[in-house]
Amino acid sequence: MKVVFIAHNNSRTELEVPVGTSLMQAAVHNNVHGIAADCGGCCSCATCHVYVQQPYADRLPAISAQ
């Protein structure tokens, strides 16, 4: 799956990642600048802000605890 990370300065990093890979894992494993992932993926440190553009948001599964 193609994932595009857009930094605050509008620089883009385009990656191909396996389906099921978290965005945080994809960013960390590909050295995407600005993704510290200090919490290890448990959403407690708030360094990985994600905005999903329409119409892609409607294609995501419902929010869950997992």
Image (spheres, grey):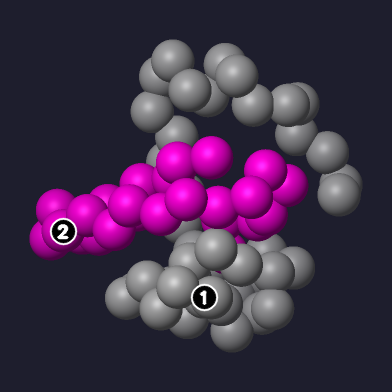
Coordinates of residue 56 in the picture (x, y in percent): 48, 23
Say the numbered circle drawn on residue 64.
none
Along the line of sight, which residue is nearer the eye, 60 or 16?
Answer: 16
Picture quadrant of residue 63: top right
Taking the magenta stretch, the answer to whether it contains residue 3 is yes
Q: Quadrant of residue 33?
A: bottom left
Residue at x 86% of width, y 49% of height: 66
Residue 36, x across and y down, in percent = 47, 81
Mark number for residue 28? 1
Count residues near mark 1 (Cα–Cα under 10 Å), then give few for <14, some for 14-19, many for 20+: some
Q: Is residue 39 above or below residue 25?
A: below
User: Is residue 9 in the magenta section?
Assistant: yes
Classify mark 2: residues with Cα within 10 Å, few (<14), some (14-19) or many (20+): few
Three-letter residue code for mark 1: Val
Q: Position of residue 22 (x, y in %)?
A: 65, 56
- Left or right, residue 63 beside residue 22: right
Helix, strand or loop at mark 1: helix
> Is residue 15 positioned above or below 24 on the image?
above
Foreground residue among 16 and 58? 16
Q: Is residue 60 left or right of residue 20?
A: left
Question: Does residue 64 lie above or below 9 as drawn?
Answer: above
What is the spatial separation of the Cα atoms under label 1 and label 2, in whole angstroms?
A: 17 Å
- Give the structural element (helix, strand or loop) at label 2: loop
Among numbered discs 1 and 2, the one appearing first in the sequence: 2
> Residue at 53% of width from left, 24% of height from top?
57
Q: Which residue is denoted by mark 2 in the rendering?
A: 11
Residue at x 57% of width, y 16% of height: 58
Q: Which residues are magenta?
A: 1-24
